[in-house]
Amino acid sequence: MAKLLVRGVGRDGENPRALSVAFNREPTDEELRMIDDFLHMMVDQSDVMEPGHAGINRKVQ
């Protein structure tokens, strides 16, 4: 399987609170979980939101 690469990130035209991410291939479920975890970690560590609030609507794993 080819290495997963990000081709681009943009705003979702139908939902202003969503992003569209284009990859070079379809991500596996494991890769999607890793991307989700990474995004939550990055937002939690930034000054964008109060710590811990990025994952407020996350499913319990």
Image (spheres, helix red, strand yellow):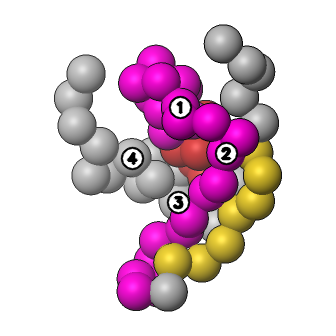
The answer to which image quadrant residue 47 occupies is bottom right
Q: Quadrant of the C terminus?
A: top left
The alpha-carbon separation of the residues under discs 1 and 2 comes to 8 Å
Q: Amino acid at mark 4?
A: Gly
Q: Mark 2 = which residue? A: 23
Query: Looking at the image, which is closer to me, 49 or 10?
Result: 10
Query: SS at mark 1?
Result: loop
Does the magenta run of residues contain 28? Answer: yes
* Circle 4 Cα neighbour tier, 10 Å, few/some/many (<14 / 14–19 / ≥20): some
* Circle 2 Cα neighbour tier, 10 Å, few/some/many (<14 / 14–19 / ≥20): few
Residue 38: horizontal and vertical position, in percent? 61, 35
Are discs 4 and 2 less than 8 Å apart at CB? no
* Circle 3 Cα neighbour tier, 10 Å, few/some/many (<14 / 14–19 / ≥20): few
Question: Does residue 43 appear anywhere in the picture?
Answer: yes
Q: Amino acid at mark 2?
A: Phe
The alpha-carbon separation of the residues under discs 4 and 1 comes to 21 Å
The answer to whether residue 23 is above or below residue 22 is above
Instruction: Give the side of residue 4 with respect to residue 50, left or right.
Output: right
Q: Amino acid at mark 1?
A: Pro
Q: Amino acid at mark 3?
A: Glu
Residue 6: horizontal and vertical position, in percent? 75, 45
Region of the chain picked out in magenta, as a range? 14-36
The answer to which image quadrant residue 1 occupies is top right
Q: Mark 1 = which residue? A: 27
Query: SS at mark 2?
Result: strand
For marks 4 and 2, give the one nearer the viewer.
2
Residue 55 is marked as 4
Residue 50 is marked as 3
Residue occupying image coordinates x 27% and y 52%: 57
